[in-house]
Amino acid sequence: DEGHPRDIAMRYGFASFSGSHLVGHTRMATESMVSPAHAHPFTAGQDFCLVHNGSLSNPNSVRRRLQRQGIAFETDNDTEAGCRYLEWRMREGDSLEEAIESSFGELDGFFTFLMATDEKMVLVRDAFACKPAVVAETDDYVAVGSEFRALAHLPGVADANVYEPAPRVIYSWSVSEAEAPQATAVAS
């Protein structure tokens, strides 16, 4: 949807929602038009969504490859190409982390991806970490933003473990169990 986040939250009644995790995104369009159809998060499959800060330089070749596999696309957005690629790899048997590792050789460009499934949230940056990201972890929540200012007013953030995620490291947080956050290094 389009509009101020507070207005959108009221329009959809976010305050009445329950659940273990939430992914929201404010988008500055650089690769495709500004419209609700191009808005993030992108979803693919039953329980997978992705928000993306960056630019993929090969979405058309990824799209053509996936279309040959019978995968339909709704937009020309580069984020949708990345989202559908990762979901396709998972349908082929990869874990999300394995799909991400595979994407390093398939998706060209610079990016920070935040993904969610019904079981976890995962964050990864490309090898150059061109696009900003910051994480705040507490015992009660994990929050991710492009800059600390987006997290500065969260409760308990003064005592949070706040850090900039490293390039090509997969950060995964379970939302179904009381597990400590973990980061998994990916070989370069």
Image (cartoon, helix red, strand yellow):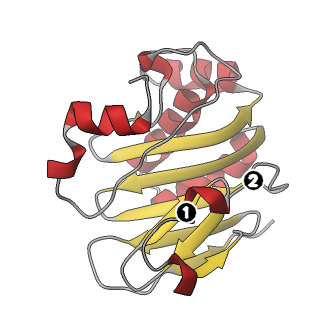
Residue 73 seen in the current view: no
| Disc 1 residue type (three-letter) | Leu
Cα distance between the residues tagged 1 and 2: 22 Å
Q: Is residue 118 above or below residue 33?
A: below
| Disc 2 residue type (three-letter) | Asp
Q: Are marks 1 and 2 in contact (CB under 8 Å)?
A: no
Helix, strand, or loop for circle 2? Answer: loop
Residue 61 seen in the current view: yes
Comparing 145 with 113, the one in front is: 145
* Mark 1 lies on residue: 151
* Mark 2 lies on residue: 126
Comparing 127 with 100, the one in front is: 127
Residue drawn at (74%, 26%) of the image = 58
Q: Position of residue 160 (x, y in %)?
A: 54, 82
Q: Quadrant of the N terminus?
A: top left
Q: Position of residue 152 (x, y in %)?
A: 57, 66
Q: Position of residue 54 (x, y in %)?
A: 71, 38
Residue drawn at (38%, 65%) of the image = 120
